[in-house]
Amino acid sequence: MQSHDKQMPIMEHLIELRNRLTWAVLALFITFGVCYYFVEDIYGFLVQPLAEIMGPDRRMIYTALTEVFFTYVKVSFFAACFVSAPVFLGQFWAFVAPGLYKNERSAFMPFIFATPILFLMGGALVYYLIMPLAWKFFLSFEQAGGGSNLAIQLEAKVGEYLSLVMKLIFAFGLCFQLPVLLTLMARAGIVTADGLARRRKYAIVIAFGFAAVLTPPDLISQIGLGIPIIILYEISIIMARISERKRAKAAADDDADEDDETDSDDDDGEAEAGTAVATAQDGVDAQGEAAASYDDGQTSLTRSSDDEGDAPKLSGPSNNDDGEDDFNNAR
């Protein structure tokens, strides 16, 4: 029974995780079907930067029978992942949020919304700025034939073009997640703003090396990705400083609360000490009253014993045995 009670919460979490994943996968399949229905329009949107440069009289080719079909499947899946990303993030947040404290939920909530927005900004940058410049650079190598020279003309393949576009969009989208990653690491105390600032020169080299690996081998794409990474790195330093200030302020507030609790405990201790002193004083007063009543009893006893004689004496008890008995009785 005890082992069953321990396993029940784990099973409930696994069941909830299964349900969340089911909804996410279902949303992906539904959006995939919708995107495949409009796949020609989506692919035309991706080809538009190249079409504007090449002109309407140019064409794209495919050399394998299944190339266009699988290219359309990739386009549909790529678009479905992008469209269903909010559903996946929502299900992920619904699964994780109940296990977080209120301050942790308020801290992580902005990053859940910032992740798809930054990815969209990276994709928009590569689509509207980098791709037109890069395609114009690559098309500059075309040559018109004349005399003994053969013409050099681009015949872009459908699958290769899609692979290049997806690579660029994913590279820029992932690089735009740099502020989210570094800010979360700063909140966790893994990195600091001063440490990031000291390593700025290394970050610049790594940024351009990363851009050289992810982008095509042209200077425009590499600079177009390297400079945004450096700008995002500087934004990450600013966000890390803000996070550190908030964490320091929260720690100061916690220390102030602890000091207030300590002062209240000291006040309670002083009150308890005063109560103990008052109790002891009451005990001393009670002992004094008891002693006074004893003296009055002795005096009255002496007077009553002396009244039997001719003259009263106030000298205290006599030294005989009766006086000692009376003293013991009175005591």
Image: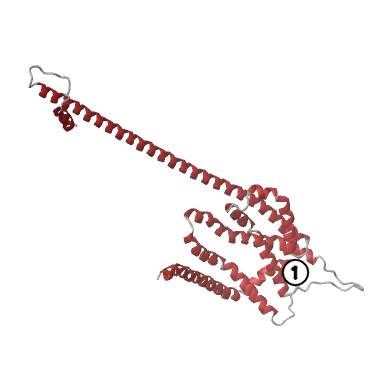
Front one among 318 and 99? 318
Where disc 1 sits, the SS reads loop
Q: In this view, does 242 lie to the left or right of 172?
A: left
In the displayed image of the protein, which residue is found farthest to the bottom?
Answer: 65
The image quadrant that residue 144 belongs to is bottom right
Q: Residue at x 64, y 76 (%)?
A: 73
**Residue 143 in the image, given as x and y percentages of width and height:** 85, 69
Q: Which residue is drawn at 75% across and 69% down?
A: 55
The image quadrant that residue 148 belongs to is bottom right
Q: In this view, does 47 lie to the left or right of 91?
A: right
Residue tagged 1 = 55
**Residue 114 in the image, given as x and y percentages of width and height:** 58, 58
In the displayed image of the protein, which residue is found farthest to the front?
Answer: 320
Q: In this view, does 288 lie above or below 39?
A: above
Number of marks drawn = 1
Mark 1 surroundings within 10 Å by alpha-carbon count, few (fewer than 14), some (14 through 19), many (20 or more)? few
Front one among 107 and 188? 188
Q: Residue at x 82, y 67 (%)?
A: 141
Q: In this view, does 257 lie above or below 145?
A: above
**Residue 48 in the image, given as x and y percentages of width and height:** 69, 68
Amino acid type at mark 1: Gly
Quadrant (top left/top right/bottom left/bottom right) for the C terminus: top left
The image quadrant that residue 311 belongs to is top left
**Residue 228 in the image, given as x and y percentages of width and height:** 69, 55
Quadrant (top left/top right/bottom left/bottom right) for the N terminus: bottom left
Q: Is residue 164 left or right of residue 321?
A: right
